[in-house]
Image: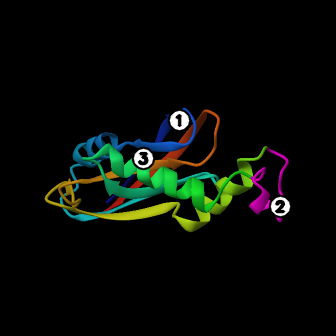
Amino acid sequence: MTQQTMLSISTRGQGLYEFTDQVEDFVQASAVDQGLLTVFVRHTSCSLIVQENADPDVQHDLLSFFQRLVPPSTDPSMGWIVHRQEGPDDMPAHIKAALTQTSIGIPVSDGRLVLGTWQGIYLFEHRDSRHQRQVVLHLSS
C-alpha cells in the first residue's frame, strides 16, 4: 500500500520550522503498520533536517553556523558568486540546500515514526523573505 500527501509550510525567513506533528498525523491516519516514509521538499533554496527539538539553542546555533559558513553574496568573501538575480540570499540559499538534503527517509513501525526521543522533522528555510514551501509525504508499506 502506498499513500501520499502534500503539506504547505509557511516560512517567515531564514530558520527552522518544525512540522513533526503534521507528519505524525499523516502516518497515523494512513493505518500503515510497517513501512518507509519519504519526506521530500519541492524547492532548491530550502532543505529538510531531522534535529533535536528539545532545546531551542540547538536551532539557534545551527542557523548561526550556516550563516557564518555561507554568508550573503554581498559579503566580500562571496565575490566569486555569479548567480545574483534574486537577491544576495539566493545563491547562498542554494549552497546551503546542497549541503543539507531535500529528501529524508524515516522508518515506520507499529504505525509510528521511528524517531528518537528528541528528534523532530524540520524545514530549513535558507531565504530571507517569506515563502510557502511544498513538502511531499510518501508512505510505502
Helix, strand or loop for disc 3: helix
Viewer-side label of 1, 2 = 2
- Is 78 situated above or below 134? below
For label 2, the SS is loop
Image location of residue 83, percent across then percent down: 83, 57
Position of residue 72 measured from the top left corner of the image (x, y, whole percent): 71, 51
Identify the residue position indicated by label 3 in the image: 60
The Cα–Cα distance between marks 1 and 3, rounded to whole angstroms, is 16 Å
Q: Nearer the viewer, residue 89 or 64?
A: 64
Q: Is residue 90 left or right of residue 130?
A: right
Q: Residues within 10 Å of mark 1 (few under 14, many from 20)?
A: many
Q: Position of 127 compared to 24: left or right? A: right
Q: Amino acid at mark 3?
A: His
Q: Considering the image in quadrants, where does the C terminus appear?
A: bottom left
Which span of residues is magenta-colored?
73-86
Real-space Cα separation, disc 1 to disc 2, in angstroms? 28 Å
